[in-house]
Image: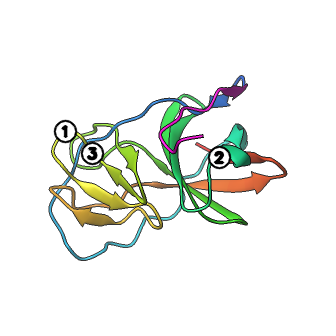
Amino acid sequence: MPRRAVFGATAAAGSLALAACAPSSQSNAPASAPAPAAGGTPVRVGKLSDVKVGGTAQGTANGQSIVIYRPDNKTVVAYSATCPHAGCAVAPANQEFDCPCHGSTFRAADGSVISGPARQPLTKLTAAIDGEWITVKA
């Protein structure tokens, strides 16, 4: 399935859906991602097989727009898709997340800013692999 594909609903509380973000401030130096946001119960947001290793996806978890990156066979990471610059939704672009509003770009691996105007990284969420599912607390 393509990295920009949307996951189908997999639980009443969570499913992957389209998301986009606006850039924040400019910075070429990577900023460290904030600690994972506290969330509720992990929800299934999609099947692991729908995100290839090195791939990205977008969706929703508990009504929040999210983006996901799968760096290897045993790991997934997730971030709020809300750009810290102006609140637009970021979207997957290879191993990055791009904000269509003002051009900010974020590293999929750690959510840090590659280029601004965004100055702050994406907010990291708690993500895990649970069998064949990707779960996220949001």
Q: Which residue position is annotated with label 2? A: 136
Quadrant (top left/top right/bottom left/bottom right) for the N terminus:
top right
Q: Which residue position is annotated with label 1? A: 101
Q: Are marks 1 and 3 in contact (CB under 8 Å)?
A: yes
* Left or right, residue 105 beside residue 18: left
**Dot 3 surroundings within 10 Å: few (below 14), some, or many (20 or more)?**
many
Q: Which residues are magenta?
A: 1-10
Question: Which residue is depicted at the point 35% across and 36% down?
Answer: 20
Q: Is residue 107 above or below residue 125?
A: below
The answer to which quarter of the image holds residue 72 is bottom right
The one of 122 and 69 positioned closer to us in this rendering: 69
* Left or right, residue 115 beside residue 47: left
Q: Is residue 138 above or below residue 69?
A: above
Q: Is residue 102 above or below residue 5?
A: below
Tell me the chief SS of the magenta region.
loop
Q: Which residue position is annotated with label 3? A: 99
Q: Amino acid at mark 3?
A: Cys
Q: Position of residue 95 (x, y in %)?
A: 43, 60
